[in-house]
Amino acid sequence: MKIVLLKDRPDLLNSAKEVVLKYSKYDYITEDNLNYLLLDNDDVIIGEIDYSLPLGSVDLLYIYIKEEYRGRGLSKYLLNESIEDLQKKDVKEIFLEVSKINIIALNLYNKMGFQKISERKNYYEGNIDAIIMKKTIG
Ligand SMILES: CC(C)(COP(=O)(O)OP(=O)(O)OC[C@H]1O[C@@H](n2cnc3c(N)ncnc32)[C@H](O)[C@@H]1OP(=O)(O)O)[C@@H](O)C(=O)NCCC(=O)NCCS
């Protein structure tokens, strides 16, 4: 299976936009963030990563890999690629918040060198705490 970043298939920009608009109200794919989407052999979007606008530091808003593609290192790949891209944009720090019970995501972020800096008590529905994490990249 060949996994590519959308930046390597700019010809698919418009069809990717159409797909994203089916599940998101934001048309967030721009010429600037093409490396934030993963496509499979059939040019289907199988993963994404989403950041707030780069202004020195950014918030990682979401990372997602389709269920049947999980456990193959794709989120690490996507995160590494986007970190490289953010470094080029002179971003120095990435912040994120993650539910205390999302063990897989916590493992991923720990593995990728994010460090816990604080907690927000009862932040999510069901009184679940949020963990705030940071990674310095510049
Ligand atoms: C979190 C998510 C993006 C991980 O994607 P993935 O491509 O399956 O992750 P990877 O295969 O790259 O694994 C990355 C790390 O996550 C952890 N991990 C992955 N699967 C795991 C599992 N089943 N159990 C425990 N830890 C796991 C491991 O630390 C792994 O690194 P390692 O293999 O070197 O030990 C994916 O599970 C997902 O889309 N979840 C739903 C959305 C979500 O919760 N997003 C995060 C909150 S915003």
Image: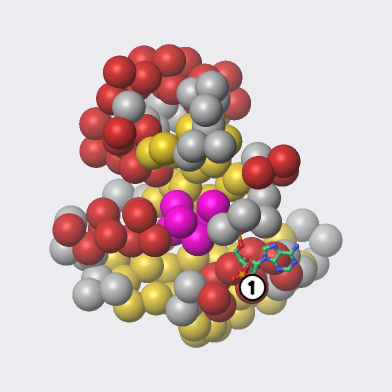
Q: Is residue 113 left or right of residue 88?
A: right
Percent coordinates x, y for residue 87 in the rendering? 22, 63
Circle 1 — which element? helix
Please state, as top left, top right, bottom left or bottom right, where the C terminus lies in the image.
bottom left
Q: How is the image coloured?
A: secondary structure
Foreground residue, 101 or 85?
85
Ligand 1 found in image quarter: bottom right
Residue 3 among magenta residues: no
Q: Is mark 1 within 8 Å of ligand 1?
A: yes
- Residue pointed to by mark 1: 107
The residue under the point 45% across, 29% down is 26
Crowdedness near tag 1: few (<14), some (14–19) or many (≥20) residues, C-alpha within 10 Å: few
Please state, as top left, top right, bottom left or bottom right, where the N terminus lies in the image.
top right
Q: What stretch is highlighted in magenta?
A: 74-79
Which residue is outermost to the front? 1
Foreground residue, 53 or 137?
137
Q: Can residue 18 be seen in this view?
A: yes
Percent coordinates x, y for residue 10 in the rendering? 28, 25
The answer to which quarter of the image holds residue 58 is: bottom left
Name the chief secondary structure element in magenta: helix
Which residue is outermost to the right? 126
